[in-house]
Image (cartoon, rainbow, N blue to C red):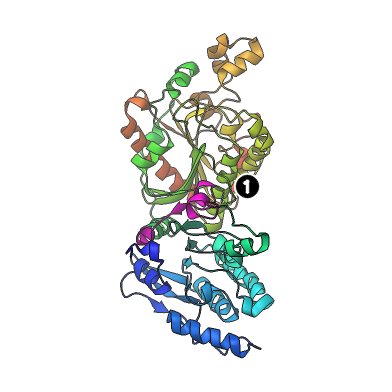
Amino acid sequence: MSTDPVARHLTARELIDAVLDAGSFASWDSPVASPYPGAGAAYEDELRRAREKSGADESVLTGEGLIRGRRVAVIVSEFSFLAGSIGSAAAQRITAAVTRATGERLPLLAGPASGGTRMQEGTPAFLSMVDITGAVRAHRQAGLPYLVYLRHPTTGGVMASWGSLGHVTVAEPGALLGFLGPRVYEALYGEAFPTGVQTAENLFDKGLIDAVVPPGQLAAVVDAALSVLLAEPAPPPPPPATTALTPGDGDAWTSILISRNRRRPDLRRLLAAGARDVLPLNGTGQGEKDPGLLLALARFGEQPCVVLGHQRPRRPEDSVMGPASLREARRGMKLAEELGLPLLTVIDTAGADLSREAEEGGLAGEIARSLHDLIGLASPSVSVLLGQGAGGGALALLPADSTIAAEHAWLSPLPPEGASAIVHRTVDRAPEMAEAQGVKVAVLVARGVVDHVVDERPDAAEEVRAFCERMASAIEYELARVKGLPAGDRLERRAGKYRAGTP
């Protein structure tokens, strides 16, 4: 017999012991009241046998404990109690725990493993998913983290309510996860449900969950998430030397050629060298993921933020930013607003995807909606021009309270070759067009679009780590600075940076 804890699927108590600090769990559960009103002898007998089999008094356990010393509320299903199904007593227990976590300002970790609502209790049990969802909504609206660990199996009404509402959602390896239970499908349609669809790994591949994590690693993931989501306020750092930097007078075309160096540091390198507590997130949560965008939680110095930015293709044939990237970006914007975190956007793109699929996927509309959301974002925001900044794909991540630019970054409505082709019907005048269009950092500073320049000595590709550390210091400083700006006129100040005619 395998001793792999995933292979034998941890009980609720075993998961609690695996995730919480030793000896820290305190139950919030009251004794279960009398059985569901109108329950017959057969159902009462089922409940009795479920208690004997599972050692639990209901299908969920709730309480609190410590994870790496941090107080956290937990709700964990016990699948061996009537397949983890949710009846009235379990629903009341869940709702009470969520409400208490909200009242005590605690982050909440849910670990569902359930076949759904309890068939023996019919429609009233089914309707209780609305009550649970309402409690989770109130918890999230209070700006409190709601983290979900989907366990094997989670299906039906549980997957379609409190199992799918996490700010961060990870899953047990190999877990069966889905709306429709395979046994129900086979009974209805006389054939087995297609294999490999309702697995944690496939959901990750489709951008529906953020990671696949063994139980033994869950505490580390929760700790990384909460280190960002619940970071204590920190004093602002001293101004870095780059705040006094003025951009050089080099020509735009030189910067464009430098920015296209394949060895130039990208967002991945910036996070690796300059950030900590980095927790990558995955996809839109709605069945899409796009390698053109990276979404993560991170801290720069002591400053937490939601990070979203362009993933520079590693090879020319790799995908560039498509409409799904911007739907994923808007997930990050919503996360920042709901949890009161600053948002950091990083721009580094030669242009958005130009394809039939991008057009049919609504790329133009997604650019518009991204601009709409960033201009009106309630959270403080910082954008970074890291390298190339071509077209609507760059503009879609630009609006922010403060913008940092690498010395050789640039921003243009099209790559200069494209602009030259439109105006002069040849790409040969691209250097001339780049200068005339004012794409370089010096012009962007003069227009008030860029607030902070990070120098390259003389090219970021030649000093990758040192450049990333300087950029990270600038990001930490600007994140702290924009958090300190008056919130009352934030949106007006932000929009004012981009008004036509602004010198």
Q: Quadrant of residue 391?
A: top right
State yes or no: residue 235 in magenta: no
Please tell me which residue is depicted at 38% across the width and 34% down the height of the picture. Answer: 242
Horizontal side of 488 relative to 440 (left or right) equals: right
Q: Which residue in the structure is indicated by mark 1? A: 376
State yes or no: residue 218 in magenta: yes
Q: Position of residue 501 (x, y in %)?
A: 65, 28
Measured along the vertical axis of the image, is residue 289 above or below residue 102? above
Crowding at mark 1 (Cα within 10 Å: few <14, some 14-19, many 20+): some
Q: Position of residue 102 (x, y in %)?
A: 52, 71
Q: Which residues are magenta?
A: 195-220
Please tell me which residue is depicted at 48% across the width and 20% down the height of the picture. Answer: 256
Q: Residue furthest front?
A: 190
Task: Check disc 1 and give the amino acid type.
Answer: Gly
Of 153 and 259, nearer the camera is 153
Q: Position of residue 325 (x, y in %)?
A: 56, 40
Horizontal side of 69 relative to 168 (left or right) equals: left
Regarding residue 345, the answer to whether it shows in the image is no
Please tell me which residue is depicted at 47% across the width and 83% down the height of the picture. Answer: 51
